[in-house]
Image (spheres, helix red, strand yellow):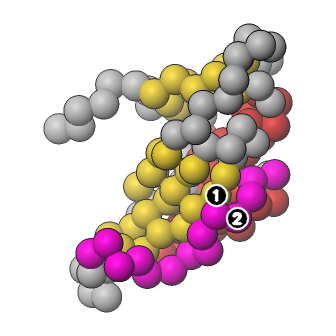
Amino acid sequence: MTIIDHIHLRSIHVEKAIAFYQAIFEALGRGPEVHTGRDWLELDGFYLDQADNDAPSSRIHIAFIARSRDDVQNFHAAGLKAGGKDHGTPGLRDYHPGYYAAYLLDPDGNNIEAKFDDGAA
């Protein structure tokens, strides 16, 4: 059972952030489940909406589960195309055997990861 009920990000670049998260969720096979409005996005307890104009951007790290190495690669490519910045190309990491991941910075500078645990590696 997961311990997290939901995550709520507030973006100072909400239009760019919505496009970024729609792209990476689609690349991870979750696109049809994303709900959006003019200035918000929601998927399975992940919420994004507009921050107050004077609010500073948060700097957090979120890791999403990928179903395969291909999904990790698709996440990275889609995120770059949707305005994210590379923060770690797809590949094996030394965290534990089979940890395959990629990292992007979203439009607000948050570190967003997709990871796949490949027991065969």
Q: Which secondary structure, mark 1? A: strand
- Residue 98 vertical placement versus 15 (above, below): below
Whole-angstrom CA distance, mark 1 to mark 2, is 5 Å
**Rendered view: 83 above or below 115:** above
Left or right: 57 in relation to 97:
right
Query: Would you call the spot at circle 2 few (<14 residues within 10 Å), some (14-19), or many (20 or more)?
Result: some
* Residue positioned 27% across, 87% down in the render: 120
Residues drawn in magenta:
83-96
Q: Residue at x 67, y 52 (%)?
A: 105
Image quadrant occupied by the C terminus: bottom left
Q: Between residues 60 and 101, which one lies in front from this camera angle?
A: 60
Q: Position of residue 119 (x, y in %)?
A: 25, 80
> Is 93 in the magenta?
yes
Task: Name which of mark 1 and mark 2 comes first in the sequence.
Answer: 2
Residue 115 lies in magenta, yes or no? no
Three-letter residue code for mark 1: Leu
Q: Nearer the viewer, residue 91 or 38?
A: 91
Q: Amino acid at mark 2?
A: Asp
Residue at image mark 2: 86
Question: In the figure, residue 99 lies in which quadrant?
Answer: bottom left
Q: Is residue 77 visible?
A: yes
Q: Position of residue 118 (x, y in %)?
A: 32, 77
Query: Residue 25: x percent and y percent?
Result: 59, 47
